[in-house]
Amino acid sequence: MLTTLMLFLACMMLTDGMAELHRYALAFSMLSMLCLFFDVVPLLSSIGGRSEVSVEPVDRRSMDDELRITYTTIIKTSPFFDHTKSYVYNAGSVAMILSPLTMLLGAYLAGEAHVELQAEPSEPSPNLTFETTRNPSNTRPSVSRRQIPCGNELS
């Protein structure tokens, strides 16, 4: 769900020549940090080895109105990278490492873009090299903003 939201934000930021980047850069940076946290927790718990847990019923006894079932929990721990496992298993390990790195990069880049775009307009930034102009081939009507009087000003 977070990944879908981030994809949606990225598409909104990149449309029309990045005209909406200033609105969504901070939100994208914060979402990247949130995803970074949720990606680092399983990575740190799996560094010593990835575990598979299975629970199987062993014994079943029925007495009067009572049913007793005994279960056995089997925990199989494999190394983080295992040449005896399938390509999918090892690709999952690579993805567990790359995902937090890309989230960290996304958070940094979006945060820097937010800081650069919020800088004083009087001082040009040497790091900001793109224009925030609307794509001329865009056929959507532009939104006009007008001030609406409120309260006692209506007469």
Image (cartoon, rainbow, N blue to C red):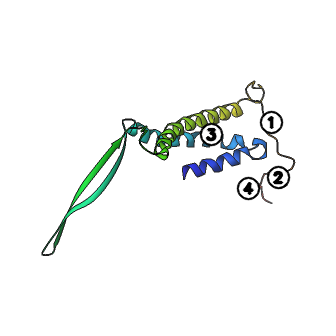
**Extreme residue toward the left, this view:** 64
What amino acid type is highlighted by mark number 1? Glu
Q: Residue furthest right?
A: 136
Where is mark 2, residue-wise? 142
Residue that lies at the very extreme toward the front in this rendered image: 84
Q: Which residue is mark 3?
A: 26
Marks 1 and 3 sit apart, C-alpha to C-alpha, by 18 Å
Where does label 1 land, which residue? Answer: 131
Q: Residue at x 65, y 51 (%)?
A: 8
Mark 2 and mark 3: Cα distance apart in space: 24 Å
Q: CA distance from mark 1 to mark 2?
A: 18 Å
Residue at image mark 4: 150
Of the pair 142 and 98, the residue shown nearer to us: 98
Q: Is residue 145 above or below residue 100?
A: below
In the picture shown, does residue 93 fall above or below 122?
below
Residue 155 is situated, as x and y percent measured from the top left of the image, at: 80, 60
How crowded pointer 1 is (Cα within 10 Å; few <14, some 14-19, many 20+) is rated as few
SS at mark 2 in the image: loop
SS type, badge 3: helix
Within the image, what quadrant is residue 133 found in?
top right
